[in-house]
Image: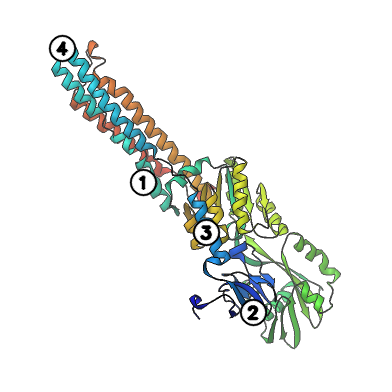
């Protein structure tokens, strides 16, 4: 049925793999719900009768019935969008520096020309007065000053696009050079946002690790759960022979079960073990404790009511994340990771990639508040994220950078969008910002310095010693100054802002 026909109080059936259409409360059923787009939590959350669910989250495992409590503008998702709009409206509009300089130069040139005409007229040489005044006006034509910044902006935009950096807000690129703190979202930014099998342990040496994984993959082959897909993928990558399972059953929040080669095999977490009154064998205790200590999801494999093995599933850290953080550290930039994940998971990832600070268990509205707190402490922040839950923080930060594979809301909230999901591209944005600023300053210094020297010469201050500029010479000097500015701006194309060049 169309979403527009939903009303508060309606009860809707949400099947496995479907998105919850509106905020509401579960009135029947149990399921795991992927809330990563709202909370940033990479692991699905167990939900049962009486629990609240949010529009846009994805149901996994089994169907649930939800009584709608909020629709349209009243949903949590709409609230996040309003926070984005508020944060965006709080930004100040920076004035363009080049326009101010050009405006000043116009009055300086006009005033200098009039002053030159008056002085030489009072000296009794009307022809010299006209010639000097025209030379002043010609030589001070603000072409170089007018091109000093716009040409750099145009070239930097082209260079960024060539390297997969889309600059939506030019001021964002200019501000990036002053950033002293980069705030990375974890899920989907520093990590790939998808679980992998990070470890397999067998309870008995008579059953190899690969056999445990093959058993789990056989049971999970018919499941749509994200963790199930990770297990099946791991078995395929190892080239294991996976038997066909029969009688597949999913028990919401407690795992799955099927018959594999005549044996009853179940895969699930601690809740499944408690339900079956099973204990973890001593041979698995060390491994499972280590996995749980670093925040991994631990699943147990049970065959005929005997725990035969365990699996560790973790959100894969992007191999480029450490390189990106090391490069930012070399540039004296502080790196903070923010996530809705549990503290154990966040600390584990943060330690692995070397961030300076970890902010864990932070909800969407909390992310925006954390950005404000850091700004109140004097931090100039670039926020990097990809999800709806990152949008308010992206809008609040001094510079918002969205991963191109992220959501439309995140992209709309950011001033810079990365076509790649490689976090090293953030270093490229900063390098381009610094290089662009240097070229702007060089061009402005040349354009202003040229006028400071050229206008007095054109006015005839050295005429008593025989040095005089005519209008033709002034036109040549004006053209040369413009060419020099243009050539200097072209040197920006040599800046290496590719992800390979940032390592």
As measured in the structure, the alpha-carbon distance from the residue carrying label 2 to the one carrying label 4 is 98 Å
Q: Rate crowding at label 1 as few (under 14), some (14 to 19) or many (20 or more) other CA atoms within 10 Å.
A: few
Residue 135 visible, this orientation? yes
From what the image shows, is residue 464 above or below residue 211? above
Q: Earlier in the sequence, mark 1 or mark 2?
A: 2
Question: Nearest the camera: 266 or 98?
Answer: 98
Nearer to us: label 4 or label 3: 3
User: Residue 484 sits in which quadrant?
Assistant: top left
- Per the model, the C-alpha gap separating discs 1 and 3 is 33 Å
Q: How is the image coloured?
A: rainbow
Are the residues tagged 4 and 3 within 8 Å (C-beta)? Answer: no
Estimate how packed mark 4 is, as few (under 14), some (14 to 19) or many (20 or more) residues with alpha carbons within 10 Å: few
| Residue occupied by mark 2 | 64
Task: Name the residue located 78 percent from the left edge and 72 percent from the top edge.
Answer: 270
Q: Which residue is mark 3?
A: 82
Of the two numbered discs 2 and 4 on the same chain, state the one appearing first in sequence.
2
Secondary element at tag 4: loop
Q: CB atoms at circles 2 and 4 under 8 Å apart?
A: no
Q: Quadrant of residue 45?
A: bottom right
Q: Residues within 10 Å of mark 3 (few under 14, many from 20)?
A: some
What residue is disc 1 on? 154
- Distance from disc 1 to disc 2, alpha carbons, whole Å, reads 53 Å
Picture coordinates of residue 501, whole percent (x, y): 50, 47
Q: For the residues carrying marks 1 and 2, which lies nearer the camera in this image?
A: 2
């Amino acid at each position: 049925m169309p979403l527009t026909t939903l009303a508060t109080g309606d009860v809707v059936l949400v099947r496995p793999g479907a998105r919850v259409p509106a905020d509401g409360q579960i009135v029947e059923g149990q399921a795991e719900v992927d809330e990563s787009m709202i909370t940033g939590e990479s692991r699905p959350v167990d939900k049962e009768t009486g629990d609240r669910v949010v529009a846009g989250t994805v149901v996994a495992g089994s169907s649930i019935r939800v009584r709608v409590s909020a629709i349209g503008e009243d949903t949590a998702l709409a609230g996040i969008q309003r926070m984005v709009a508020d944060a965006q409206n709080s930004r100040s509009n920076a004035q363009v520096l080049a326009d101010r300089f050009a405006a000043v130069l116009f009055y300086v040139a006009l005033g200098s020309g009039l002053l030159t005409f008056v002085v030489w007229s009072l000296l009794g040489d009307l022809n010299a007065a006209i010639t000097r005044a025209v030379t002043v006006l010609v030589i001070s034509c603000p072409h170089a000053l007018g091109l000093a910044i716009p040409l750099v902006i145009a070239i930097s935009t082209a260079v960024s696009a060539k390297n997969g950096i889309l600059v939506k807000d030019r001021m964002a690129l200019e501000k990036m050079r002053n950033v002293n703190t980069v705030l990375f979202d974890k899920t989907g930014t520093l990590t790939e946002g998808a679980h992998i099998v990070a470890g397999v342990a067998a309870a008995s040496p008579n059953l190899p690790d690969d056999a445990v994984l093959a058993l789990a993959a056989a049971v999970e082959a018919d499941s749509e759960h994200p963790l199930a897909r990770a297990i099946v993928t791991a078995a395929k990558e190892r080239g294991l022979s996976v038997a066909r399972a029969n009688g597949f059953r999913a028990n919401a929040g407690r795992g799955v079960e099927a018959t594999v080669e005549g044996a009853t095999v179940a895969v699930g977490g601690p809740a499944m073990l408690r339900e079956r009154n099973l204990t973890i064998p001593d041979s698995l205790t060390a491994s499972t404790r280590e996995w749980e200590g670093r925040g991994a999801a631990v699943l147990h494999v049970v065959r005929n009511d005997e725990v035969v093995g365990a699996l560790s599933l973790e959100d894969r850290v992007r191999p480029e994340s450490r390189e990106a953080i090391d490069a930012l550290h070399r540039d004296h930039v502080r790196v903070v990771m923010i996530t809705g994940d549990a503290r154990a998971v966040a600390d584990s990832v943060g330690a692995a990639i070397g961030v300076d600070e970890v902010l864990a268990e932070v909800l969407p509205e909390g992310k925006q508040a954390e950005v404000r707190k850091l700004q109140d402490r004097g931090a100039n922040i670039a926020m990097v994220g990809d999800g709806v839950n990152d949008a308010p923080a992206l809008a609040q930060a001094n510079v918002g950078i969205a991963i191109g594979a992220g959501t439309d809301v995140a992209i709309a909230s950011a001033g810079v969008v990365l076509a790649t999901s490689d976090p090293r591209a953030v270093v490229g944005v900063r390098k381009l910002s610094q290089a662009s600023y240097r070229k702007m300053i060089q061009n402005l210094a040349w354009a202003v310095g040229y006028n400071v020297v050229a206008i007095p010469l054109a006015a005839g201050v050295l005429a008593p010693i025989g040095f005089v500029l005519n209008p033709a010479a002034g036109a040549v000097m004006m053209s040369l100054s413009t060419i020099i500015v243009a050539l200097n701006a072209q040197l920006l194309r040599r800046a290496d802002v590719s992800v390979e060049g940032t390592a």
